[in-house]
Image: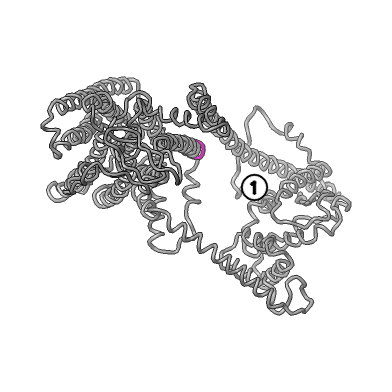
């Protein structure tokens, strides 16, 4: 019978390790140890004559590979080798774990004092048998190992001890018990074990303070996690409805952060200084009637909410705004603050910061979704590694069960879609239906844009209707009804399309709704900057545009509430009470996401004319979240076909960045560079364009003296020069392109690493099969040798009788 090989472990040491304190943070020796183990086994195999080259002569016939044999059909020697593998021994019992970490702590403590293992004879080197990784049922030996481990832990530093305890694969109760036992007694000095010295009060006080600060830090960290906005609500939505519906609420949370950042800049540099130095009102303040909450006019007109309230002076003393449009000249003294320059610079800087934040968020979401969001091969991880064992409450446990179940449904649905291809005739039929539906949807969007244009022209030609405050809500109401009804028509047309993938269905619906929103917003932008500026000559047209955008934002929120009430609540009641159906309506992700993007685009369009509009958008988003969450949990059901929304966040941010933000930036740039401001209101009343505020400031700096002569140079070559703008744009696009390429390279590397891991698993199976064949051959040779020996040792008389017979 072949004897098992002796696994000798030789841990190489470098001279640089001597004289240094052992640290458990450096785990690179593990790889060197296994490399050395492989080298030792190769040498032992060579000494015993087990050359792997003989396997080529034993393979008969063709290139048929040896298949993996079950453990029940393998030899005893092979089973012994399999039982000695680290994957079979480590983690088998608590005693094995304690023994393993005891040997590790001994190695850490004695590494600096022991000689190199290379100087020993091979037979005198320690082997893996010394680690005693086999299962030991004796409780007494386990307690002895635990006591030895406690002693070794006491000899380590506090940081090394904590790191070692955290790395042990034991339960929290056992780790807590080891930590309590490894603490030094109160009556002895921790730095001098066994010396018998009494610890001073300062040492105990310091130790107590460290523990108190550590507990306080953990409590603050838990409190910060608990204070995360809508933390439990988002977990509940993701557990019951899946990642597809959850992506809508995460996108809403992202929009809330963008508006908070924008509002902070506007309040700090525009509204705050103007509130500190308020201008004189041109007349008595109008009385509020309550209708201003819908129209934005009335008593809201002469406030910091709109462009016309802001002064065109250098703020340092209160100054009345002359009605004839002349320059305000405040008294000398105080803090100089150029309000026109601050207004224009703050809006520009806020848009630039928003652009950088959007690009960064989009790149981060792209990396997370396309690098980590790969769904191939994660079914087993979801089944065996998704449960959080820190969960103790029944409510949280049920929520986690729902989340894992929904995740598995999404993965299985996506796997099923990949393995169900269509035929050629089915694809042609699908393409024809898609083309027809697309033509109908594009015609619907074009018709809505034409209707908005005709109605806006009618409002301009009806001055008697424009003079009534309630009539101002007619155009926002018509646009809101078109935005509400056209997506339902597109949804009915989409029911004719044979979409297999719900992801593709959502993407197509988003594209159609986006085309509709862009057509309507483009018509409205022409209406505001092309028609209204010419009609409202001699009036403050900027205030009218700001009020119009406020009305559109409020009307969009009101129609969203009505759609939630009648489209989800009433339909659920009719379906359950009258139709006797248990099926509830599904949450329309495409339409709701486009509503958020539409509202955010209105906010960005109105920042220049209504600096307080981001605050209105924040209030709207907060109300939308709670209304949608309540309606979702009460009136909607999970998608009938679960699907994984790993890339939805990236798609939403891309749509928010390029069509929405880029369009708003072009609109504001045209208003700043080309449109003449009103001559009766606002900080740019005496200028031909808003952009001339920077040139006026540069002329003042040039007249101030040579000390600030570098500022006009910066404005001339970095602001007015278009080359710098194109250079910054090119650099931004280059960063986006390089980030995309880096993410693609990382995805390719990850795929190669996964393939390498799979190949290494096959290599292990191949080597174990070869070892099994070698041991079988040796057993056959041993049996044949034993049989030959028995025949040679047989008595001659027996051989003669056999010959006679």
Question: Front-most of 444 and 135?
Answer: 444
Depicted 694 relative to depicted 28: above or below: above
Name the colour scheme.
Answer: one colour
On the rendered structure, is 551 left or right of 326? left
* Residue at 77% over, 79% down: 196
Q: Position of residue 546 (x, y in %)?
A: 28, 36
Question: Front-most of 400 and 128?
Answer: 400
Question: Front-most of 800 and 174?
Answer: 174
For residue 777, what is the image quadrant? top right
Q: Residue furthest front?
A: 332
Q: How many marks?
A: 1
Residue at which label 1 appears: 74
Question: Front-most of 710 and 633?
Answer: 710
* Residue at 72% over, 34% down: 58
Q: Which residues are magenta?
A: 370-374
On the rendered structure, is 630 left or right of 215? left
Q: Position of residue 233 (x, y in %)?
A: 36, 54
Depicted 41 relative to depicted 141: above or below: above
Q: Position of residue 25 (x, y in %)?
A: 69, 54
For residue 143, what is the image quadrant? bottom right
In the rendered image, residue 635 lying in the magenta stretch gets the answer: no
């Amino acid at each position: 019978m072949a004897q098992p090989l002796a696994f000798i472990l030789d841990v190489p040491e470098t001279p640089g390790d001597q004289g240094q304190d052992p640290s458990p943070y450096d785990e690179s020796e593990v790889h060197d140890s296994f490399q050395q183990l492989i080298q030792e086994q190769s040498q032992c195999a060579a000494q015993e004559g087990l050359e792997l080259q003989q396997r080529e002569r034993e393979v008969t016939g063709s290139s048929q590979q040896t298949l993996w044999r079950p453990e029940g059909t393998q030899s005893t020697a092979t089973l012994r080798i399999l039982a000695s593998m680290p994957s079979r021994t480590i983690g088998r019992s608590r005693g094995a774990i304690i023994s393993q970490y005891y040997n590790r702590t001994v190695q850490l403590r004695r590494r600096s004092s022991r000689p190199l293992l290379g100087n020993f004879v091979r037979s005198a080197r320690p082997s893996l048998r010394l680690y005693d990784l086999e299962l030991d049922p004796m409780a007494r030996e386990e307690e002895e190992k635990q006591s030895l481990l406690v002693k070794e832990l006491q000899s380590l530093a506090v940081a090394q001890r904590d790191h070692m305890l955290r790395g042990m694969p034991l339960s929290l109760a056992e780790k807590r018990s080891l930590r309590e036992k490894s603490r030094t007694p109160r009556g002895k000095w921790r730095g001098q074990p066994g010396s018998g010295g009494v610890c001073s009060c300062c040492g105990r006080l310091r130790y107590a303070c460290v523990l108190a600060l550590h507990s306080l830090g953990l409590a603050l960290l838990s409190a910060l996690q608990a204070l995360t906005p809508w933390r439990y609500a988002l977990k509940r939505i993701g557990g019951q409805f899946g990642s597809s519906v959850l992506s809508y609420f995460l996108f809403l949370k992202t929009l809330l952060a963008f508006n908070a950042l924008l509002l902070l800049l506007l309040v700090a540099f525009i509204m705050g200084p103007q509130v500190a130095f308020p201008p004189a009102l041109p007349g008595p303040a109008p009385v509020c009637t309550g209708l201003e909450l819908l129209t934005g006019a009335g008593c809201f007109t002469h406030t910091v909410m709109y462009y016309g309230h802001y002064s065109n002076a250098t703020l340092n003393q209160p100054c009345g705004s002359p009605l004839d449009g002349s320059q305000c000249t405040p008294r000398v003294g105080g803090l100089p603050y150029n309000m026109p320059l601050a207004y224009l610079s703050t809006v520009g800087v806020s848009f630039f910061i928003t652009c950088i934040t959007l690009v960064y968020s989009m790149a981060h979401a792209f990396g997370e979704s396309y690098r980590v969001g790969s769904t191939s091969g994660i079914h087993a991880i979801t089944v065996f590694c998704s449960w959080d064992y820190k969960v103790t409450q029944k409510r949280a446990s049920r929520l986690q069960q729902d989340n894992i179940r929904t995740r598995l449904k999404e993965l299985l649905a996506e796997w099923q879609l990949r393995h169900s291809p269509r035929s050629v005739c089915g694809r042609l039929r699908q393409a024809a239906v898609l083309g027809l539906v697309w033509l109908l949807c594009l015609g619907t969007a074009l018709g809505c844009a034409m209707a908005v244009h005709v109605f806006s022209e009618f409002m301009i030609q009806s001055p008697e209707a424009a003079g009534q405050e309630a009539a101002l809500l007619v155009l926002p109401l018509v646009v809101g009804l078109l935005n509400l009804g056209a997506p339902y028509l597109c949804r009915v047309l989409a029911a004719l399309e044979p979409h297999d993938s719900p992801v593709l269905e959502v993407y197509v619906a988003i594209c159609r709704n986006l085309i509709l929103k862009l057509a309507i917003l483009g018509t409205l932008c022409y209406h505001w900057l092309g028609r209204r500026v010419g009609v409202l000559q001699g009036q403050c047209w900027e205030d009218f545009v700001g009020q119009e955008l406020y009305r559109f934002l409020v009307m969009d929120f009101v129609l969203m509430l009505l759609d939630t009430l009648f489209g989800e609540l009433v339909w659920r009641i009719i379906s359950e009470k009258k139709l006797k159906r248990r099926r509830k309506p599904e949450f329309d992700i495409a339409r709701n996401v486009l509503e958020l993007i539409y509202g955010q685009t209105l906010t960005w369009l109105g920042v220049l004319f209504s600096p307080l509009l981001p605050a209105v958008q924040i209030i709207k988003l907060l109300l939308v979240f709670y209304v949608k969450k309540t309606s979702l949990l009460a009136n909607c059901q999970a998608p009938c076909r679960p699907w994984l929304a790993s890339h939805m966040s990236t798609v939403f941010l891309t749509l928010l960045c390029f069509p929405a933000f880029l369009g708003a930036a072009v609109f504001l740039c045209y208003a700043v560079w080309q449109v003449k401001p009103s001559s009766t209101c606002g900080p740019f009343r005496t200028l031909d364009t808003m952009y001339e505020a920077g040139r006026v400031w540069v002329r003042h700096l040039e007249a101030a003296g040579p000390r600030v002569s570098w500022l006009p140079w910066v404005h001339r070559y970095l602001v007015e020069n278009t080359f710098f703008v194109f250079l910054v744009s090119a650099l931004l696009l280059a960063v986006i392109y390089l980030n995309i390429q880096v993410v693609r390279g990382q995805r390719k590397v990850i795929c190669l690493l996964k393939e390498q891991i799979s190949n290494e698993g096959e290599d292990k199976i191949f080597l174990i099969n070869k070892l099994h064949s070698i041991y079988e051959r040796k057993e056959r040779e041993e049996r044949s040798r034993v049989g030959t020996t028995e025949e040679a040792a047989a008595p001659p008389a027996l051989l003669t009788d056999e010959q006679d017979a």
